Image (cartoon, helix red, strand yellow):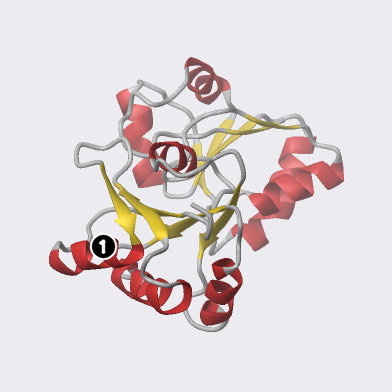
């Protein structure tokens, strides 16, 4: 069986009792970065074998891992933070397990998009999650498509591209588009900057963006 186990995106208390039990009982833990995951496991006194499973080796590793799962091993897949498969490695392994008849169970738990969306103050009954925008090719086209979106849009962004993204949003969507820019969710310096795209851009041009970001974009009707 493959367990997909969400891990805290900041505060180490944001892990479920079930997740801790699964990690303690797994034959092996597949970790995006074993050094990062070791901090969490050490904190909760969990001592299980770990293997690296990340975007640079996942294509080569999938077949062998599925064979081990089919032979009876139980594995727990974790990423550095949040739910594996959501802008993190995990999809390829889950898909191959499903194809090969290996049971896949995803535990509920931490992910950055839901708390950011709910705290934004923008409608969260209908939304679209876009993950990270393309860095170069297709970026402008994607923004133009999202400009016409009537649902709330959720994006992930690097602190190094926040100002660039907000600048492009102002150009394509208009500076008055409602937005909430959330950073460092569940961490000590958690912050939500609400207002228009222009207001958020001005703020982060003055205050250096730091940490991991989620950008929530309201529709033209909000």
Query: Residue drawn 39% across and 56% down?
Result: 179
Which residue corresponds to mark 1?
199
Dot 1 falls on a residue whose secondary structure is helix
At 20% from the left and 62% from the top, the residue drawn is 203
The quarter of the picture where residue 159 lies is bottom left
Q: Which of 101 and 163 is in front in this view?
A: 163
Q: Name the residue furthest front.
A: 221
**x then y, percent, for residue 127:** 59, 48
**For this view, does 77 lie left or right of residue 161?**
right
Q: Quadrant of the N terminus?
A: top right
Q: In which quarter of the image is residue 28?
A: top right
Please name whichever residue, 77 or 158, is drawn nearer the observer in this view of the structure: 158
Instruction: Tell me the residue at 73%/37% (across/down).
Output: 69
Q: Which residue lies furthest to the bottom in this view?
A: 137
Q: Residue furthest left?
A: 206
* Residue 184 in picture, x, y percent from top left: 29, 45
């Amino acid at each position: 069986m493959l367990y997909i186990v969400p891990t805290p995106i900041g505060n180490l208390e944001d892990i479920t009792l079930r997740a801790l039990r699964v990690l303690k009982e797994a034959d092996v833990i597949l970790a995006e970065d074993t050094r990062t995951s070791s901090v969490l496991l050490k904190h909760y006194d969990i001592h299980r074998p770990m293997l690296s499973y990340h975007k640079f080796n996942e294509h080569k590793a999938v077949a062998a891992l599925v064979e081990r799962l089919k032979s009876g091993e139980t594995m727990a897949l974790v990423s550095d933070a949040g739910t594996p498969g959501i802008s993190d490695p995990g999809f390829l392994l889950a898909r191959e397990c499903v194809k090969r008849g290996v049971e896949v169970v995803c535990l509920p738990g931490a992910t950055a998009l839901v708390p950011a969306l709910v705290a934004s103050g923008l409608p969260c009954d209908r939304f679209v999650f876009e993950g990270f925008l393309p860095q170069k090719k297709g970026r402008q086209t994607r923004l133009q498509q999202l400009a016409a979106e009537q649902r709330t849009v959720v994006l992930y962004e690097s602190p190094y591209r926040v100002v660039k993204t907000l600048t492009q949003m102002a150009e394509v969507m208009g500076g008055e588009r409602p937005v909430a820019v959330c950073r460092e969710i569940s961490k000590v310096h958690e912050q939500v900057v609400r207002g228009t795209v222009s207001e958020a851009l001005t703020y982060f041009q003055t205050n250096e963006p730091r940490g991991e970001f989620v950008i929530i974009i309201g529709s033209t009707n909000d």
